[in-house]
Amino acid sequence: MRNLSAPSVLELIFQCTRGLRWGGIVAVLVVHWAPGGMAQTASPSSTGTRQAGTQRPDFSGIWARLPSSRQISNSDMFHPDEPPLTPWAQEKYRVIRKGIADPSQQAREDIDPILEPYCMVPGFPRIYLRPGAMEIVQTPNALYMNFDEHSQSRRIPMDGRKHLANAPPSFMGNSIGWWDGDTIVIETVGLNDLTWLDGMGHPHSMELRIDERIRKIAADTMKVEFLFTDPQAFTRPWSGEKVFEQRPDWELMEYVICENSTGEAWWEALEEEGVGNREP
Amino acid sequence: MQHRFRGSVHSLGLAVAACFTVLAAGGWAQTAPRTGADLSGVWVLLPAARQVPGTITDRFSPDEPPMTPWALERYKAARKGLENLPNEQGRDAIDPILHPRCLMPGFPRIYQRPGAMQIVPTPGLFLMLFDNYSAARRIYLDRGHPEGVPPTFMGHSIGRWDGDTLVTDTVAFNDLTLLDSMGHPHSTDLRVEERLRRVAQDTLEIQFLFEDPKAYTQPWRGKKLFGLRPDWELLEYTICERESGEDWWKLLEQEGLSRE
C-alpha cells in the first residue's frame, strides 16, 4: 500500500466502493458476523475479486474432517462402494485383509506400513484419513497443506508450472493446482509404492494419479472430491469425497504415530550404553 | 488483522478497510511482508568452507558447547570409539534418526540434514518447509506460546520482526532428538532463539542461541549460512524409506505378493 501513488489509490477506492454497491456489502457483513473470525485474507479477497468476475474463496485456516456420520463413508475410506480393483490389486487386498471378517474394519495391523516396525509416514492421500487436523495456507500462487501427522506438508504450486520431470517417487507425490471458478483443482502424481490409499488397505501402484476438486460448500465447510486413476490397481477411475470444517481456534499439533514405541526403543538403546537417565 | 473483522465496527468503514486489506495483501507471497524483509525462496545449507571457520555441517558452533555432566555422559556415549575423529558424526548405532528407530530429526537438527528448505512468509505465519520428511516448521507471528503445549519433534515456534531480522523463539521439544549430528544431546527444557537475516541477496544467515539448563551450563551461540536456489523445488527425502520400505515389502513377499 505504501508504494501506491495517490491517483491509483483513489482509483482503487473507487473500484472498491463500486464493488460494494454491487453486493460487496453482503460479503462484508458475512465477515463481520462470522463467529470466531475468519482467516486473515479470507473475505477481503472474495470481496475484492467479486467485481473482477471471478470469486476465489480463501481456504486458509485449520480444518478438521467431519465425523463419519456427516460423510458418505467411514473415516477409513473415500467412498462406501468397493473400488474396481484389478486382479493384481485384488490379490493384494485379500492378503491385506486376511482374517478380518468385519468389512468396515481397518486392514491387518501387522502389515500396515504406518505401524511398527515400519513406521512409515501415511503419505498422500491416506493422510487425509488420519486423526488430526490440517492447515491450509493459501498464497496467490501456491497452496500449502500442513498436517498434524508427522508435521508434514503438501506443496501445491498454482503458478502454471508443470509436474517436475524425473522427480523421484515420494510419499506426498508431486502436485500442481489451478483455479476453476471457485474451485481449486489439484493433480498429484509421483507417488511411491510404500503407502496404502486408505485405512482399509486398498493398494495402489506408482501409476496412481489423483485429481482433487476443493470447494467451499458453506462459509466454514469445504468438500474435497477425489478421482483415483491407477490402471495397474483399478479397472477404471473411481471417485470419493471428504468434507472438512473450519476450526478457527485450533492450532496444529504434531502427531507421530510411532513416537512412543520407537522413542522407547531409542532410550532402551541408550540404556544399554549405560546412559539410562532420561531425566538429568 | 483477524481481529479487525470482529466487534462492532461500522460496516462501511469495515468495507473500506477490507478493500485496503486487499490492496495491502496483494502479492505478499512474492514480496516482503508488511514489516521485516523478504526471506522467501528455496535455501540450502552452504558447505562448511563457507560457514564460520570450523563449523562443519554437523555442528552449529566450532566451539564445544558447555555441557553439564548429564549431557557430557550422553555425548561421550554418542562418540565412543570416535574420539580421534572429531569431525565424524555421532555413532550410527545410537542415532535416533537411523534404522530401526527412524525418528524424525526434529528441530534444530533438521537444518543440518541434506536437502533444501523453502521459506513461505505470510502475514501471521512464517512457514519453513523441508525436503526432509516433507516436514513443515510453523512460526506464528501473531501469538505467544500456548499454555501446556505438548512436546514435539519440531517444538512450538513464535516470531517477531526486529527491523529486517526475524527473531524466533522455539520451546516444547520432546527428548527423542539430538541437537546436532555430532550427538550433542538436549533435554525437554531446550529453548532455541534464532535471528534470521538476509546478509546478501542470495545468502540467509541464521544465528542461534541455545538454552537448556539441564544439558548446558550456560547459553551458547551458533550460526549457519544458507544460499538461495531460485530454480530449485523441494524434493521429499525420507531417510529410512529404503530400509523400512524393503522390510515392508519383504513381509508382503512372505505373504505371497510381488512388488511388481
Image: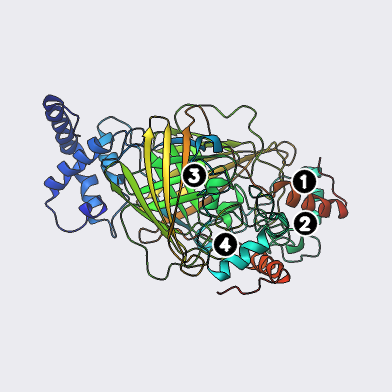
Instruction: Tell me residue A229's x, y (percent).
Output: 65, 38
Foreground residue, A186 or B136? B136
Q: Which residue in the structure is indicated by mark 2?
A: A96
Report how far apart the C-alphas of labels 2 and 1 lie in the structure: 10 Å
> On what subunit does the disc labeled 1 rest?
A
Q: Amino acid at mark 4?
A: Pro
Q: Give the foreground label among 2 and 3.
A: 3
Say yes or no: labels 4 and 1 on the same chain: no
Residue depth check, mark 4 versus mark 3: number of the one nearer the observer: 4
Which mark sits nearer the N-terminus, 4 or 3? Answer: 3
| Residue B215 rendering spot, x and y as whole percentages | 51, 66
Q: In percent of the image, x 82 and y 55: which residue is there? A: B251
Q: Chain of mark 4?
A: B
- Judging depth in this view, the residue of B159 and A23 nearest the camera is B159
- Label 1 belongs to which residue? A89
Q: Is residue B111 above or below residue A149?
A: above
- Which is more toward the observer, B209 or A264? B209
Residues marked 4 and 3, same chain = yes
Q: Residue at x 15, y 57 (%)?
A: B8
Graded by Cα atoms within 10 Å as few (under 14), some (14 to 19) or many (20 or more), the crowding at tag 4 reads many
Q: Which residue is mark 3?
A: B129
Dot 1 lies on which element? helix
**For the residues tagged 3 and 1, is the chain the same?**
no
Q: Which mark is residue A60?
A: none
Instruction: Please tell me whether mark 3 sits on a helix, a strand or a loop.
Output: strand
Q: Is residue A43 left or right of residue B221?
A: left
Q: Are marks 2 and 3 in contact (CB under 8 Å)?
A: no
**Which residue type does callout 3 highlight?**
Leu
Residues at discs 4 and 1 in contact (Cβ within 8 Å): no
Residue at 50 percent of width and 67 percent of height: B188
